[in-house]
Amino acid sequence: MSEPKKIAYVDKDACTSCHLCVDELPEVFVMDPDDLAEVHNPTGAEEDAIQDSIDTCPGECIHWKE
Ligand code: SF4
């Protein structure tokens, strides 16, 4: 039995526009026209790699959807 894929999202209200997540995982994150990060491809990287972005985001604004 396989677990359903976890889906990450960005709480844009807390994003500091540092671009770290986009620099690390452009397969998953992109900056929107307001220079706030968003997830454009939630399955673009392994969960471990996305978890690293969650752990290093200075705004602590990347989360898993429950
Ligand atoms: S790492 Fe966090 S604060 Fe920086 S751009 Fe990405 S979501 Fe925003």
Image: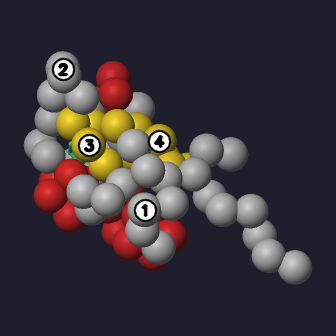
What's the residue type where badge 4 is placed?
Answer: Tyr
Q: Earlier in the sequence, mark 1 or mark 4?
A: 4
Using the rendered image of the protein, determine whether residue 16 is visible from the camera's viewpoint.
no
Name the element at disc 2.
loop
Residue 9 is labelled as 4
Pointer 4 and pointer 3: residues touching (CB < 8 Å)? no
Can you identify the residue that label 3 sits on?
30
Q: How many neighbours does mark 1 have within 10 angstroms: few (below 14), some (14-19), or many (20 or more)?
A: some
Can you identify the residue that label 1 sits on?
44
Q: Nearer the viewer, mark 1 or mark 4?
A: 1
What's the residue type where badge 3 is placed?
Answer: Val
Name the element at disc 3.
strand
Can you identify the residue that label 2 sits on?
34
Q: How many neighbours does mark 2 have within 10 angstroms: few (below 14), some (14-19), or many (20 or more)?
A: few
The location of residue 36, given as percent across then percent down, is: 23, 30
Label 4 CB-ligand 1 distance < 8 A: no
Q: Earlier in the sequence, mark 1 or mark 2?
A: 2
Q: Earlier in the sequence, mark 4 or mark 2?
A: 4
Identify the residue at horizontal 80%, vertical 76% (top origin).
Answer: 2
Marks 4 and 3, how far apart at CA: 11 Å
Figure quarter occupied by ligand 1: top left
The location of residue 47, given as percent across then percent down, is: 50, 70
Q: Earlier in the sequence, mark 3 or mark 1?
A: 3
53 vs 5, nearest the viewer: 5
Q: Is residue 40 rendered to the left or right of residue 6?
A: left
Residue 31 position by quadrant: top left
Identify the residue at horizontal 33%, vertical 23% (top origin).
Answer: 13
Q: Nearer the viewer, mark 1 or mark 2?
A: 1
Q: Is residue 41 rendered to the left or right of residue 29?
A: right
